[in-house]
Amino acid sequence: MSMYDELVPQFHKMLGGLERWLEEGEAFATARELDLDALLTARLYPDQLNLTRNIQAATDTAKLAVARLAAVDAPNHEDGPATLPQLRARIAEVSAYLQAADRDAVDAGAARVLTLPFLPGQTVVGRDYVRQFAVPNFYFHLTTSYAILRNLGVKLGKRTFIGSLPLRELSERRRRTSISPTASQAPSAGALPPEAQPQP
């Protein structure tokens, strides 16, 4: 799999999910007449970043990973206190930036030696930076954002986190040649494997 395919589509998809979580959070706060600032400044523990900063960190990680691989400048965004519309605009801008990324340039960055501002005097190969820092860091802040909203009582579940799958219809020919499970092996109607079961 190319570095572009490994990184860009999934980052773009998950940022779309983050936008939907914020919509659910806003609806939750509105229905209960809660201050939106209280939502955005909520955190899981006093020494952790709040929801706003986690969203900012997730979007920064996504745009900087692509920019560093492609050897281009990333869009600039100010960190710190922000309103819900500002956070949504930031997510939309980073999503658009990812969609516009040059596939060949991103792929070329897999073997590029990178220098990072927070690791002075050291270097890292692009593919290692992506797999061992950018992706884990992105999901850390994304998951923390989800957990903050869930901890407040926003109705989100595992399917909300994972999002959609690029499913395809099985062709008629393949249906005819597929081996059907026996009655004892066949799942019951509507049954899902444990990993796909809805979670609180």
Image (cartoon, rainbow, N blue to C red):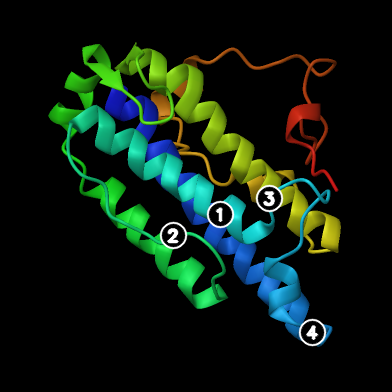
Question: Is the C-beta separation of discs 1 and 2 under 8 Å?
Answer: yes
- Residue count near mark 2 (Cα–Cα under 10 Å), binned few <14, some 14–19, many ≥20: many
Residue that label 4 marks: 31
Q: Residue at x 71, y 66 (%)?
A: 41
Which residue type does callout 4 highlight? Ala
Which residue type does callout 2 highlight? Ile
Tell me the CA gap for discs 4 and 2: 24 Å
* Disc nearest the viewer among 4 and 3: 3
* Disc nearest the viewer among 2 and 3: 3
Residue that label 1 marks: 55
Residue 120 lies, in percent from the top left, at 37, 22
In front of the other: 88 or 21: 88
Earlier along the polypeptide chain: callout 4 or callout 1? 4
In the drawing, what numbered circle is on residue 49?
A: 3
Q: Do we see residue 160 in this rendering?
A: yes
Earlier along the polypeptide chain: callout 4 or callout 2? 4
Q: Residue at x 75, y 59 (%)?
A: 149
- Residue count near mark 1 (Cα–Cα under 10 Å), binned few <14, some 14–19, many ≥20: many
